[in-house]
Image (spheres, coloured by chain):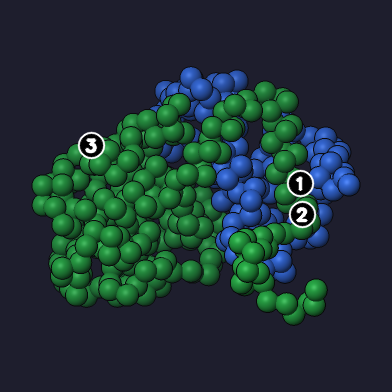
Amino acid sequence: MTEAAKPEAAKTEWTTVSLLEGIKENGRVWEDLANQYGVTNPDPPWKTSLDGMCEALGTTSCSPAMAVEKRWLDGSIDRAEVGGAVPLPLLERRWEEDELSETLYQDVPFPERQLLALTHSLIKRGLVSEEDLAQRMKQIHERLTAT
Amino acid sequence: MSNDHDHDHDHGHGHKPPAPMVEEISDFEALEIAVRELSIERGLFTAEDHRRFTEFAEHIGPTPATRMVAKAWLDPEYKKLCLTDGIKASLAVGVDWLNPTGFGTPSDYTDLRVLEDTPTRHHVVVCTLCSCYPRPILGFQPEWYRTPNYRRRLVRWPRQVLAEFGLMLPPEVEVRVEDSNQKCRFIVMPVRPAGTEGWTEDQLTEIVTRDCLIGVTLPKPGKTTNIKLPVHHAVNPANH
C-alpha cells in the first residue's frame, strides 16, 4: 500500500442518509428474527448474496478493474485515474466500512452493518440514489408479501 | 393441534416437520435485494457475476484447511509439501488455490503459505490493510478479524490480544504476526497437542478449529468450537 493511497479515504466526514437511518432504527436484525422464529442459522439468508455483491463490485470477469486498482495501490497512477474503471474500489469500500462501523453504524450488528455501509458508499458516489432505493424496497416488500 | 404439541418427532408417518423459518421480510433483507437489483440495472456488475460469486460464498468454509493440518500431522511427507508449496498441498484437500471459483478469482490469490508453529514459536495472522483472508481454504472471516480493533492492536500488542482470546503464551515462546496482503495469504499449522496419540485424521480435524488456523488459539482435545468474542470498537477511529 502506498501512503498516498490511504489518507484520501480516511478523511471522510460522514453525513447521515435518512433512508439508512430509518432502517438502522426500525429494521429488525437477524439475531432478533432468528430468536423469535427459533431459527439456528447464525447468518441471515441474504449474507452470501451480500458477499457475492462485494466480490462482484470489486472485480469483473476479465478483471481489468482490479488491475487498475493495483496500479493505484502501488503508486503507479493517481486515485482519479481509478474512478473510470472501478465504480467502487475494493479497498475504499473496506476502509469506508471500517469508518462507518465505528461511527454512524456502530450500534448495528454484523452483517447488517456491512450492508448499511456498502449502501452508504454507493449512495455517496451517486451509483444508486436514496430515492430509487426507497422505491425499490417498497416494491420488494409488496412483491415478497403478495398473496 | 395444540400449541404445546412436540414437533421434534417425525409424527410416525415418514417425514419430519419443516425446520422453523423466519416468516417476515425485514428491511435489511429488502435493502439487500434493492441494492443488488439496482446495481445490476446500472451495470455495476452482471447478474451472472453475482450468481457465481454468491455460489462461491455459499460453498467455502474451514473444512479444507482443517483437513490439511490434520493430514500433515499424520503424514510427514505431506507436511513437508504444505510448508514448501501451500498451493500444491491445497489440491490434496480439494482446493485449486489459483482458480478457486472456477471462473476467475475473487481477489489476487497468488500465494498461500502455511506457517509452522513450534514449541518455541507461535504464529498469528492478521490483515492490517483491510481483511485479506485465505477464503478458498478457510471460508469467510469472523467478524472480529475484520475489525480495526483486532487489526491495529494485534501488531502492537500481540500477547495482550491473544490473551483476550484466552491464549496466554509464556515469555519463552516467540510470537510472530504475519500480515496478509494482496499477494499472499496464510494459515497457521499448530503443534499437534498431547493427548491425540493414535487419533485418526477425522478425529484430528475436529480440534483444528478456524481459530487455531488463524492462530488466536491452540488445538486441544475436547475443544472443537470457535470463540465467540464480543466486538469492541476501537478507541480511535479507523485509519487514524
Image check: A53 left or right of A6? right
Q: Earlier in the sequence, mark 3 or mark 2?
A: 2
- For this view, does B129 lie left or right of residue B175? right
Are callouts 1 and 2 both on one chain?
yes
**Residue type (three-letter) at the residue carrying disc 2:** Ser
Horizontal and vertical percent for residue A8?
56, 38
Question: How far apart, in angstroms, are the residues tagged by discs 3 and 2?
Answer: 44 Å
What is the chain letter for disc 3? B
Q: Secondary structure at mark 2?
A: loop
Q: Are marks 3 and 2 in contact (CB under 8 Å)?
A: no
Q: Is residue A40 above or below residue B133?
A: below
- Asked whether the viewer can see residue B149, the reply is yes
Please, what is the three-letter code of the amino acid marked with disc 3?
Answer: Lys
Q: Chain of mark 2?
A: B
Horizontal and vertical percent for residue A49?
61, 42
Residue at the spot 71% in from the left edge and 66% down from the top edge: A37
Q: Which chain is blue?
A: A
The mark found on residue B82 in the picture is: none
In what element is the residue under mark 3?
Answer: helix
Task: Please say if the residues under marks 1 and 2 sit with CB atoms less than 8 Å apart.
Answer: yes
